[in-house]
Image (tube, grey):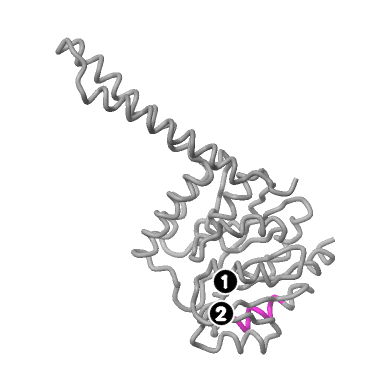
Amino acid sequence: MTGTLTERVSVVVPAFNEGASIGTLVSELRTAAAWREIIVVDDGSTDDTGRRAADAGARVVRHPYNKGNGASVKTGIRNATGDFILILDADGQHRPADAVRLVARLDQYELVVGARSGVTQANAARRLGNSMLNAIASYLTEQQIPDLTSGFRAARREHLLEFLHLLPNGFSTPTTTTLAFIKAGYSVWFEPIHAGVRDGESKIRLGPDGVKFFVILLKVITIFSPMRVFLPLSLASFAIGSVYAVWTIVTQSHVTNSSVLLILLSVIIFLVGLVSEQISSLRFERRDQ
């Protein structure tokens, strides 16, 4: 069954200045299984990434300039001809042998994510950040998510195309696809993997990209599970305003403006959350019944 599946899988590898590792990765992928095709999206690299990928046997699609990891993934999905898509980074962190295990799950699941163990996720700061994101995502989806940001994943192409318009051009494509699949009710599996040390330097900068991830997380919250955030805030504001109102009535024999404003704020937050929830539901309605 796995052999049959791999022959229907298009492998998509977004790559930007990964000349040191891309040739070896493509060769190892070709050794691991008989894929339908291996597509390397050269995201405007200034080194020999494209040439090395082509020499190793990949089909290379080149961006005229650097657009971002997410944009490269979208280009790969659009150019793929397989029924299934396997996405992995070009930096050497992911073992091609693990790809076969991910693909083997596609006969049961619409999305399979390579979940890295905590000890294999870069440095301590990155592990802490990923743990926080995993906890927030688990809360929003009411489902345990062990690795939200893993770029190693396999999915049915038709379902990825459904959410293509939601995917950003930057580094949060894994986050968005995971939450989108869960929100849409598709079956998602997290396959334990071991991530190696990447070749070269990471393209993610802790300072600037950390702020971008925070902004993206806020967008993701409002897109996928707004009431999971707005409702607690509304209840907290109402509770504080009510308690303060009771306290001022007892101690000062009147209700202060602050109490009234907090209670009104709770109502506004609840209504905004309600509208956001309806918009979120409409966004995920199937267009092709």
Q: Position of residue 254 (x, y in %)?
A: 18, 13
Q: Residue, x 17% and y 10% (percent of image)? A: 253
Q: Amino acid at mark 1?
A: Ser
Q: Position of residue 192 (x, y in %)?
A: 63, 56
Assign the N terminus to one quadrant of the image: bottom right
Assign the C terminus to one quadrant of the image: top right
Q: Position of residue 39 (x, y in %)?
A: 67, 76
Give left or right: position of 221 versus 105: left
Which is nearer the eye, 279 or 198?
279
Q: Residue, x 59% and y 68% (percent of image)? A: 73
Q: Examine the image and state in which quarter residue 162 appears.
A: bottom right
Q: Position of residue 133 (x, y in %)?
A: 46, 50
Which is nearer the eye, 104 or 142?
142
Contact? badges 1 and 2 (CB < 8 Å): yes
The verdict on residue 23 being magenta is yes
Give left or right: position of 97 versus 65: right
The verdict on residue 27 being magenta is yes
Q: Residue tagged by mark 2? A: 63
Q: SS of the residue at dot 1?
A: helix
Nearer-N-terminus badge (1/2): 2
Relative vertical location of residue 141 with respect to residue 32 in this rendering, above or below: above
| Label 2 crowd bin: few (<14), some (14–19), many (20+), radius 10 Å | some
Q: Amino acid at mark 2?
A: His
Give left or right: position of 37 versus 92: right
Relative vertical location of residue 276 with respect to residue 3 in this rendering, above or below: above
Give the spatial CA distance, label 1 vs label 2: 8 Å
Q: Residue, x 59% and y 42% (percent of image)? A: 282
Which is nearer the eye, 171 or 200?
171
Q: Residue tagged by mark 1? A: 72
- In magenta, the rendered stretch is 21-29
